[in-house]
Amino acid sequence: MRRFCYILLPLLLLVGCDKQDVMEPNYNAQDNLEALWKIMDERYCFFEEKNLNWDSIYYEYKRRLKGVRTVFGLFDLMDRMLGELEDGHVNLYTPFAVSSCSSWYDDYPKDFSFDLIKEHYLHRNYRTINGLYYDTIDDVGYMYVSSFSVGIASATMQYVDYFFRNSKGVIIDVRNNGGGELTASESLAACMFKEKRHVGYIRHKTGKGHNDFSEPKRIFIDPAVRLIDWSDRRVVVLTNRRTYSSANDFVNIISYADNVTVIGGKTGGGGGMPLSRDLPIGWMVRFSAVPSFNADMESIDGGIDPDEFVHINEEDYAAGVDPILEKALRIIRNIE
């Protein structure tokens, strides 16, 4: 069963350390750097795809160890080394900081402002529950799914479905959705399918080599897990670069639904399901370990193109207009 959590992680606590211990602990910086490098070398799944020479990266950061004097310096060095991967699923967790990578979305348009949508498109009494926001925009249903970290209850979707009963179609907005539970994203995606359909593949590491993977395993979406039946409704899904992880998986799945159109920006990717390992110093590293692909065996880690690119510029924000949402409304209303 392919059921993983993309986002939820344990909290790390710092206990029993005085200032001297924090600044100058009894640890070996090189041992920890090597341990981090080895974990990634043996378990990370995208070295070949990213065309990275991990050996060269190790020697470069080993050289930089000479200037490290505190745990903060070691953290910063490890953070920069992991940043070479440009992977939003790679994080270093310590008692005092968590590293993260933003390069995968920094150079892309934001393409979203929920404040703009609330002010200019929704009614004041729009509904919200567990990160799900929904309302009607005249004759079209609008649902913003801000995260998949909390499962979407079947009862909730029954109410949403009833609320949209007179709508010409439904807009599902997953812009800035950073992911969460695959079970949540898949149960929503399944709503758009009448029958079981092949939507991708998954592989697992079988050895320590960068190319040691199992044979691809076919992945299917099954309407049996759907929350409601929207397979006959016209649905438009809105995306941007910060649509990531299990939200990226959601977009891959619904791209195979006959009644769905995807518009907006390219998704952020995050097609490698994460695992975590501990370092000798007591810190934890999370990393992409299980690559996933679409039904054509193409990697979805770098993101998924929409059916039509639409972006928001600064003039749009100033005017209170969301061209992506406007385009979705026209598609559902058959205006163009």
Image: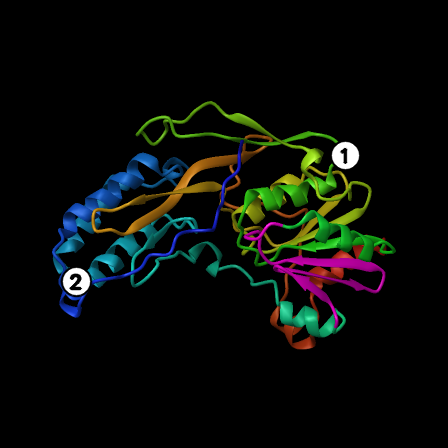
Looking at the picture, the colour scheme in use is: rainbow
Against 107, residue 292 (above or below) is: above
In the image, 246 versus 50, the foreground residue is 246
Q: What type is the residue that disc 1 sits on?
A: Lys
Q: How many angstroms separate mark 2 from mark 1 (CA)? A: 58 Å
Q: Quadrant of the C terminus?
A: bottom right
Tell me the residue that label 1 is attached to. Answer: 194
Against 112, residue 224 (above or below) is: above
State left or right for residue 107 relative to residue 161.
left
Residue 146 image-quadrant placement: bottom right
Question: Which residue occupies 57% across, 59% down?
Answer: 176
Is 126 contained in the magenta span?
yes
Tell me the residue that label 2 is attached to. Answer: 70
Residue 93 image-quadrant placement: bottom left
The residue segment tinted magenta is 125-151
Q: Residue furthest right?
A: 166
Is 35 contained in the magenta span?
no
Q: Quadrant of the N terminus?
A: top right
| Whole-percent x, y for residue 204 in the image | 43, 30
Question: Which secondary structure lies at badge 2?
Answer: loop
Against 310, residue 313 (above or below) is: below
State left or right for residue 38 relative to residue 154.
left
Question: Which residue occupies 25% across, 62% down?
Answer: 15
How many badges with numbers are in the image?
Answer: 2
State left or right for residue 44 relative to residue 18.
right
State left or right for residue 223 relative to residue 17.
right
| Whole-percent x, y for residue 324 in the image | 69, 60
